[in-house]
């Protein structure tokens, strides 16, 4: 059994060594940019050949956030028309931003029409928002006339 673990450890060490093997500096090629007077070489600090070239080409786009571009919240696929902490939200339904940015609903309450309500016992929002119980009935445990 110990022999098996020794062979596995040696195989893993060999695989790791081969994966991070670096090449000679003679094999590095210099590339010229479009201006032809700037010369760049591959970064020697990268253990994997070609990785620095890929990272040098990658230029991430700045993400569009609603604090800079408020119109993106008006899009059809947007999660809401209001901007709170760089996110589009609907302050009429969002439990973390109910009625205004940063106003959280407590445990057991739900945001209905910009107010935090107890849907388990609220006559006008029984079980869910805008689920009104009939006249003379009551809301108990999220159901009208339960019992």
Image (cartoon, rainbow, N blue to C red):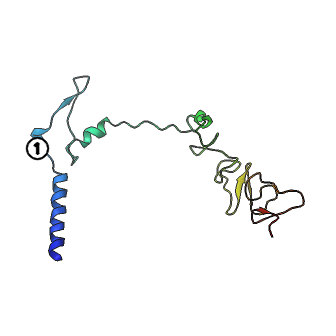
The image shows residue 115 at horizontal and vertical percentages of 74, 52
Which SS class for mark 1?
loop
In the displayed structure, 128 sits above or below 50; it is below
Return the residue nearer the eye: 74 or 42.
74
- How many residues crowd around disc 1 within 10 Å: few (fewer than 14), some, or many (20 or more)? few
Q: Quadrant of residue 55?
A: top left
In the displayed structure, 75 sits above or below 2; it is above
Disc 1 target residue: 24
The image shows residue 19 at horizontal and vertical percentages of 19, 52
- Look at the image and tell me in which quarter the C terminus lies: bottom right
In the displayed structure, 46 sits above or below 75; it is below
Q: Is 101 on the left-hand or right-hand side of 133?
A: left
Total numbered circles: 1
The image shows residue 46 at horizontal and vertical percentages of 23, 46
Please name the residue shown 23% across and 27% down the image: 38
Please name the residue shown 15% across and 65% down the image: 10
Please name the residue shown 17% across and 32% down the image: 30
Q: Is 102 on the left-hand or right-hand side of 60?
A: right
Q: Quadrant of residue 60?
A: top left
Q: Is 97 on the left-hand or right-hand side of 18?
A: right
């Amino acid at each position: 059994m110990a022999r098996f673990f020794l062979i596995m450890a040696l195989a893993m060490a060999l695989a790791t060594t081969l994966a991070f093997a670096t090449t000679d500096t003679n094999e590095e090629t210099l590339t010229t940019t479009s201006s032809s007077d700037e010369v760049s070489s591959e970064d020697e600090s990268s253990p994997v050949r070609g990785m620095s070239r890929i990272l040098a080409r990658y230029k991430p786009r700045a993400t569009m956030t609603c604090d800079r571009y408020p119109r993106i919240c008006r899009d059809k696929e947007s999660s809401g028309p209001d901007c709170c902490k760089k996110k589009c939200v609907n302050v009429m339904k969002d439990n973390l931003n109910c009625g205004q940015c940063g106003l959280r609903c407590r445990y057991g309450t739900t945001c209905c029409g910009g107010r935090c309500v107890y849907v388990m016992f609220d006559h006008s929002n029984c079980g869910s928002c805008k689920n009104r119980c009939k006249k003379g009935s009551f809301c108990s445990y999220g159901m009208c006339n339960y019992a």
